[in-house]
Amino acid sequence: MRTNAGRWGWIIPILLLTSLVANILGIILPFLEIDEAFHGKVIYSLPHSVYLMWEHKLYFISGLILGFSIIFPFVKLFSLFALWFIPWKSKNRERYLHVIELLGKWSYMDIFVVILLVTLTSKQSFISSSIHVGVYYFIGAITLSMITSGVIMTLARKTCNKEAPRKFKSDKRRWMLFDNIYLGWIVPVLVLASAATLIESLNATFLRISQMFLVSRSYSISEIFTLMYSQKHWVLLIIMVGTLFVVPLLRLTILLFSWIIPFSPKKHTKVKYVIDEFSRWSMLDVFGLALFLITTEGKDLVKTEIQPGLYIVVAAIGSSYLLAVIAIMLNKAMLHSNTISATSSDTQ
């Protein structure tokens, strides 16, 4: 890909090397410090966290942190180097990139675990926490690798389209809402339902501290926003607001407009790629996994009780996945009849 990428030829390797260095620093530098009464201060790095979780027999969370936060980022970066410098079949390269794209955001899980721990230990007398610089290097590394893989995916897709262009029988605009009166209404209804559950999930109380010597407090996503703002954790606040609210809402808005406004089949395809990109940065599901780990396997540190609002968060995650599956299926079904292969077009 490097030889055909023009100005991106050496920009991509520089970005990947920067991400690699930041990733190494994010692993070896301190991540989080927790000061617990009668136990003293403990400074966590990512490898130390894995070791401590394993020592406390928290095998599931230990495995997830090891897999998504330590092993996978390096596998991803070296894979991107290989995709950039080693010749691949265009279709195979695009498929492999698609898998990497799907898994990439799960490396943010540990960041959400840190945010939840900082939240639960804030304004307490017997336990406190503070963030160290390793968190910011790790955030920079994961964010940069996701941006870089997105650029590579766009370039790989262009290469595939040049080699085997997707052609359409007609450039006539398709009105997805009315072209099939029995199916067209499903996606807009699901979009509105998903938006409603998303907004409701921000204010739903999902967790409450229930431990002796600790102040009992209940938490929602919006309250975590407020806490991050009051403690001036600007980077963590941007991540929370962006990935849990702004990006998911933009994704739903674009999907709704693509369904109720007539576009040509080619334009529909481009809009789908844009929606896919927004999906990579929509992380309510990643936050949900971090929340699950805290509530089930983080009780050795802070005991918590699940509140009814957690089910609203789960509903928001479920509706997002259901919407994605149905939108993809209907999009393919409604545009498939208008698609012809490059080969059949040439033979005519």
Image (cartoon, rainbow, N blue to C red):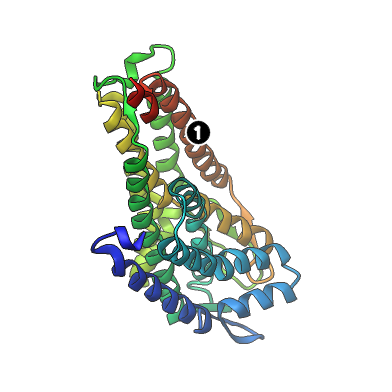
Could you tell whether 110 is left or right of 173 in the image? right
Report the number of numbered marks: 1
- Residue 159, above or below 70: above
Quadrant the C terminus occupies:
top left
Indicate left or right for 66 with 321 as reference.
right
What amino acid type is highlighted by mark number 1?
Val
User: What residue sits right under mark 1 in the picture?
Assistant: 325
Residue 121 point in image, percent of width and height? 53, 72
Image spot of residue 221 (x, y percent): 45, 54
The answer to whether residue 123 shows anywhere in this view is yes
Q: Nearer the viewer, residue 116 or 63?
A: 63
Q: Nearer the viewer, residue 173 or 237?
A: 173
Residue 169 in which image quadrant: top left
The quadrant of the image that shows the N terminus is: bottom left
Mark 1 burial class by Cα count in 10 Å: few <14, some 14-19, many 20+ = few
| Residue 230 seen in the figure | no
Residue drawn at 56 percent across, 65 percent down: 72
Q: Position of residue 54 (x, y in %)?
A: 72, 73
